[in-house]
């Protein structure tokens, strides 16, 4: 039966507007960094409505939506200031467990992801393995029914509020370093794990170092075959290639920034500055509309089973920079009065931060857009390789 | 031999300032509590006062060292390489220029010997939208926010758009303040005034106030150029050291070119600032146009260099633990001191004819 996408969009919009609690939308609208405190109740609401997992098949408790529906869902959520769903369980490890996990693993891990009771983080990067992820060295050796894991992960987002870490570990040294990597699911309360916060330039706590000192992990927590972890990691990335197609959050930030400028630089005295910043916003907006159009092309391609080619890399490169440009405009609007009020000295508590400080924090945070998820340089290498045919 | 930046003004004062700034940065970067940070800033401030930095531009008859702009610039060069988190330009240059113009000999002497720690409020100081701006009538009312300040300020030196210069005890009845740390770890205060008695030092000083601001902008440019030179050195060192895909990052041409671009921006700004500094030292009137152009360029070039070093450090670029990244935040902040790009562009365009 053909899907009525317009009716679908209306349903989703009504749900978003009526069911997402105002306090959650306020956090999203104010541009603050999200944490489990905000995400979890929202996931519970979605789950109760049967929309816990838009990208999963029905058999596993998903909605069974097609790509067009998922795209509409994501867009509407962004437009209504609903949080994007926390991705590590739903979009990353969940689909891998569905594809490669045993029935027992599916029964054990998927319900917690769906309900929002279990929180996941990604233990891929290491001090020596960033862009070159296959250089990872955290080692797991087999001892009976367990692996014993030793090493260090870093940049682990949300590890401090997570229950589980899906982790790439080295189980053997092979000639090709992509081989000999295994995917383990590690409970973060296991003895031998130490999580340390990393102080980032945005002033938020979101990334951590995770130290693993002889951590025992049951073999039952291994996904798929030993030594095949790289394949599963790539599967995960393939699934995520449409992630960049959702330009709605960027456009939303842009319109918020436009409001900020109108407010901050009202009046004749600020006209020249206001107009200069508005022009820069317009240039970013034009680029984002290009990305928006490409996103629709990408969704159509997936719906028709056509290959995406370079589209995801193009989208990632251009939207990450647009995000940064918008954040820079905001910084130029408020920097003089807010960049100096980064950390309050006297007094703490809920009102300690200068209202609007998020603009400064976001400007800092947005620098990461061109670094994580495949840095700009790595994306350019991918594009150039294909363009040049070598 | 990899690149080492040549200071705009080298010599003993530069070396000493650099050493002090690097030690101060190491001390601050180990602290996480804002309160501890403030206490450390106070100790560091006392150290530079002890060394006579605040006395540099104060005349000998007022108890100072009778130095010139080049002497402060040498300190700024060294301080800039370590991102010294103290208001050198504001207190070491703008404050004495305003006090001298207003004939406040006693306060100058106190500035020089450290008994006065002066927070300068310039015209166009920021104010939160929807809150009453600072008004000077028979009493002072309203507020200003995000004003750079030395630790434990004893005085407020207030310059108005009309050309008045006022001096107030920072603890005068009706004054309240809120302290924060800026993105570059320096100290800032929000000041609120309710029925505060104004103490007028002098009137009709609008040109002198503008000159003082320009001196501040110039010294900020000197600090900024120094910081950018150090950032480039440290980026090169990082890329030489960091191996990905079995090769040092320094071997990837894409990254080498980006460092080359940073260097071109840096050199261009260095030339401009050196020129403005020479002009300021020799000419009778301050070369405000050169200073405005330099400050405009600092906004552009500084941000480029800051963004590039973050990018090339990868995830490390998002952390406060890396010295180059702390310097990048210093350079980002400099854009908003003594007039941002819009402000400078506005002046340049208005007086182009
Ligand atoms: C805020 C944040 C959150 C993160 N969250 C997670 C997480 O939850 N889980 C996780 O596993 N990881 C996470 N990461 C890590 C992220 O994936 C890495 O930072 C990223 O892969 C880059 O690796 P790196 O930091 O080691 O930089 P490097 O790989 O050392 O790169 C440094 C610079 O060199 C460039 N470069 C590298 N190789 C080349 C080349 N061949 N040619 C040209 N230029 C090159 C890079 O583009 C970059 O500019 C996060 C990072 C950050 C900053």
Image (spheres, rainbow, N blue to C red):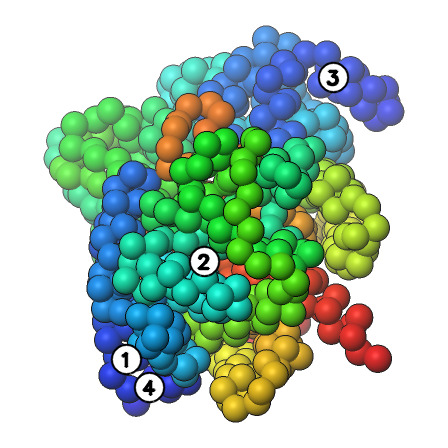
Q: Nearer the viewer, mark 1 or mark 2?
A: 1
**Which residue bears the numbered disc 4?**
B10
In this view of the protein, which residue sits in the foreground, A246 or A96?
A246
Tell me how far mark 2 sits from mark 4, CA to CA: 24 Å
Disc 3 to disc 2, C-alpha distance? 39 Å
Where disc 1 sits, the SS reads: helix
Query: Where does residue B193 sit, x and y in percent of width and height?
Result: 55, 35
Residue under mark 3: which chain is it in?
Answer: A
Q: Residues within 10 Å of mark 1 (few under 14, many from 20)?
A: some
- Is the residue marked by circle 4 packed among few (<14), some (14-19), or many (20+) residues within 10 Å? some
Task: Say left or right for B250 vs A235.
Answer: left
Q: State whether discs 3 and 2 lie on one chain.
A: no
| Residue A70 visible in the picture | no
Pointer 3 residue: A17
Residue behind mark 2: B329
- Determine whether B201 is above or below A197 in the image: below
Query: Marks 3 and 1, how far apart in space?
Result: 63 Å
Q: Residues within 10 Å of mark 3 (few under 14, many from 20)?
A: some
Sequence-wise first label, 1 or 2 = 1
């Amino acid at each position: 039966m053909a899907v009525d996408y317009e009716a679908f969009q209306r349903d989703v919009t009504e749900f978003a507007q009526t069911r997402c609690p105002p306090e959650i939308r306020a956090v999203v609208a104010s541009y603050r960094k999200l944490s489990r405190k905000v995400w979890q109740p929202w996931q519970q609401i979605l789950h109760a409505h049967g929309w816990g997992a838009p990208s999963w098949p029905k058999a596993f408790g998903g909605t069974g939506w097609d790509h067009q529906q998922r795209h509409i869902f994501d867009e509407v959520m962004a437009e209504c200031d609903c949080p994007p769903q926390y991705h590590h369980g739903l979009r990353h490890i969940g689909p891998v467990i569905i594809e490669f996990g045993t029935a027992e693993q599916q029964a054990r891990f998927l319900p917690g992801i769906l309900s929002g009771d279990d929180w996941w983080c990604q233990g891929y990067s290491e001090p020596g393995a960033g862009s070159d992820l296959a250089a990872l060295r955290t080692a797991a050796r087999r001892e009976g029914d367990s692996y014993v894991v030793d090493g260090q992960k870093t940049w682990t987002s949300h590890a401090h509020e997570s229950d589980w870490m899906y982790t790439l570990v080295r189980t053997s040294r092979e000639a090709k370093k992509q081989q000999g990597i295994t995917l383990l699911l590690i409970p973060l309360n296991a003895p031998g794990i130490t999580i340390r916060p990393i102080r980032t330039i945005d002033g938020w706590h979101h990334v951590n170092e995770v130290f693993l000192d002889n951590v025992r992990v049951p073999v039952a927590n291994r996904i798929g075959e030993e030594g095949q972890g790289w394949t599963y990691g790539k599967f995960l990335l393939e699934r995520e290639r449409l992630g960049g197609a959702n330009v709605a959050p960027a456009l939303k930030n842009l319109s918020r920034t436009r409001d900020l400028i109108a407010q901050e630089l009202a009046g004749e005295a600020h006209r020249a500055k206001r107009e200069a910043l508005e022009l820069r916003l317009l240039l970013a907006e034009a680029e984002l509309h290009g990305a928006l159009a490409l996103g629709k092309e990408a969704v159509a391609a997936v719906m028709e089973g056509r290959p995406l080619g370079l589209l995801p890399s193009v989208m990632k490169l251009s939207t990450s920079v647009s995000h940064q440009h918008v954040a820079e405009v905001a910084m130029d609007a408020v920097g003089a009065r807010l960049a100096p009020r980064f950390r309050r000295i006297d007094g703490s508590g809920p009102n300690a931060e200068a209202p609007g400080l998020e603009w400064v924090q976001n400007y800092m945070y947005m620098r990461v857009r061109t670094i994580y998820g495949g840095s700009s340089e790595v994306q350019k290498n991918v594009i150039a390789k294909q363009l040049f045919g070598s | 031999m990899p690149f080492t930046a040549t200071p705009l003004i080298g010599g003993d004062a530069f070396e000493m300032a650099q050493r002090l700034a690097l030690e101060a940065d190491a001390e601050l970067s180990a602290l996480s509590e804002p309160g501890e940070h403030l206490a450390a800033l106070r100790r560091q401030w006392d150290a530079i006062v002890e060394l006579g930095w605040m006395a540099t531009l104060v005349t000998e008859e007022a108890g100072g060292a009778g130095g010139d702009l080049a002497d402060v610039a040498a300190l700024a060069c060294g301080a800039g390489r370590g991102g010294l988190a103290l208001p050198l330009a504001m207190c070491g240059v703008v404050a004495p220029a305003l006090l001298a113009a207003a004939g406040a000999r006693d306060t100058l002497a106190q500035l020089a010997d450290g008994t006065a720690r002066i927070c300068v409020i310039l015209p166009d100081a920021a104010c939160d939208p929807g809150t009453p701006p600072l008004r000077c009538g028979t009493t002072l009312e309203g507020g200003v926010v995000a004003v750079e300040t030395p630790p434990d300020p004893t005085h407020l030196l207030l310059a108005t758009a009309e050309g008045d210069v006022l001096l107030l005890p920072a603890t005068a009845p009706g004054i309240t303040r809120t302290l924060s740390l800026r993105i570059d770890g320096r100290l800032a205060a929000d000041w609120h005034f309710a029925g505060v008695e104004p103490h007028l030092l002098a009137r009709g000083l609008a040109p002198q106030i503008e000159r003082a601001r320009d001196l501040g902008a110039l010294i900020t440019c000197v600090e900024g150029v120094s910081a950018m030179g150090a950032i480039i050195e440290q980026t090169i060192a990082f890329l030489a050291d960091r191996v990905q895909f079995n090769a040092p990052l320094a071997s990837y041409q894409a990254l080498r070119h980006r460092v080359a671009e940073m260097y071109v921006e840096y050199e261009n700004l260095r030339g401009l600032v050196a020129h403005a500094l020479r002009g300021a030292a020799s000419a009778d009137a301050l070369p405000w146009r050169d200073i405005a152009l330099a400050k405009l360029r600092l906004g552009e070039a500084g941000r480029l260099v800051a963004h590039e070093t973050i990018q090339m450090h990868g995830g490390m670029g998002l952390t406060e633990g890396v010295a180059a990244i702390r310097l990048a935040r210093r350079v980002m902040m400099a854009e908003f001191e003594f007039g941002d790009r819009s402000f400078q562009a506005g002046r340049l365009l208005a007086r182009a004819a």
